[in-house]
Image (cartoon, grey):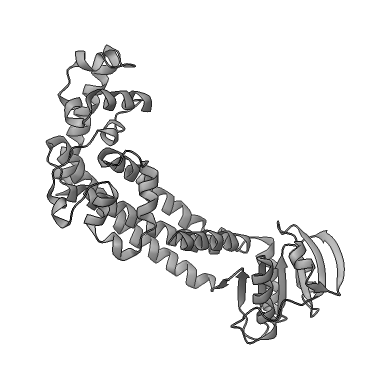
Amino acid sequence: MLKDEKIEDELLQVLRKVAPGTPLRDGMENILRAKTGALIVIGDSPEVMNISEGGFEINADFTPASLYELAKMDGAIIISEDTKQIIAANKQLIPDLLIPSTETGIRHRTAERVAKQSVELVISVSQRRGVITLYKGSLKYVLKDIGVILAKANQAIQTLEKYRSVLDQVVLELSNLEFLDSVSLYDVTKAIQRVEMVMRVVKEIERYTSELGVEGRLITMQMEELVSNVEVEGLLIIQDYTTDVEKSPESIFEMINSWPAEDLLDFALIARALGYSGGQSILEQNVTPRGYRVLRKIPRLPVPVIENLVDSFGTLQHILRASIEQLDDVEGIGEVRARSIKEGLRRYRDKLIQDRFTNY
């Protein structure tokens, strides 16, 4: 899965380079409309220049109009890595013919082989089919119609709204159970699963917005509003319940993030990622949070103070039962802050009760 994540990140970087609103995309759209076709290499590395012949050097600033005019010639166009300069045009590319290719057309076959040999981004604009195909290393991606991508992005946003709503309900229930000291491992793993499901929809939307470019700004704004603090909440839940002190919450979260979808459905597997051993029966085990997540709900309470509180009392229940004098004894907490912590916890608990009755 880590390899898949690397490929996904590479694809997002590629899509951002050719997204609507960029000069490169404007130039390619002009070529599509003129039905002339083009072979474009992004990057003038030695690997590219060593397999190119003929043509002529340009070394001029990139403009969409220049790309369109140069595409009228048969050869390839070489553009700098940052897409700000046109390096050369009408170049004959001669990649290694032993490199396997699944393409049938000469332009696309050359593009695929050059991309594999040079590991640079190579773009083939089809003259007959009117499509833009991206190649980079072994990666191949056909750009889709903006209307289709926009419709899929909007559908994904609706899914994200539903997932976020379910997550909020699950986390609300977990918080209430924490105050009652009635949390089971099932409640914890369910919350972590819902966080991960939300983050996976976010990844899907990020691919769409990368391909949409300026057309996806509203989608991005909606997504960012819907997922605010979701990842932080997930990390704090892991920090509250993990028994594996050698692994950071971030490393555990990344491990779960790398799992295939079917593994995410196994709550016992999530429990084992947190350091608990056993089969499905371990989900019935009662667990107590350390209190990191609930303490973060108290306004203006610094993280170092939260760390001192957890180090001193060990669990949320011990913190809840502590007197003002006991809180005052903790490093970094005076009487004023001790009273503020007690009041903050009381207000948060009242809010949870109110939210629970409102939702039901």
Of residues 335 and 4, the one nearer the viewer is 4
Tell me the residue at 75%/60% (across/down). 80
Relative side of 36 to 180, left or right: right
Of residues 283 and 157, the one nearer the viewer is 283
Tell me the residue at 32%/43% (across/down). 233
Of residues 91 and 239, the one nearer the viewer is 239
**x, y percent for residue 154:** 41, 64
Residue 274: tell me if it is visible.
yes
**x, y percent for residue 111:** 67, 76
**x, y percent for residue 225:** 40, 48
Q: Is residue 145 above or below residue 195?
A: below
Q: Is residue 189 above or below residue 108?
A: above
- Looking at the rendering, which quadrant does residue 342 occupy? top left
- Looking at the rendering, which quadrant does residue 333 occupy? top left
- Looking at the rendering, which quadrant does residue 175 occupy? top left
Number of residue marks:
0
Tell me the residue at 83%/60% (across/down). 60
**x, y percent for residue 265:** 26, 61
Quadrant for the N terminus, please. Answer: bottom left
Relative side of 112 to 153, left or right: right
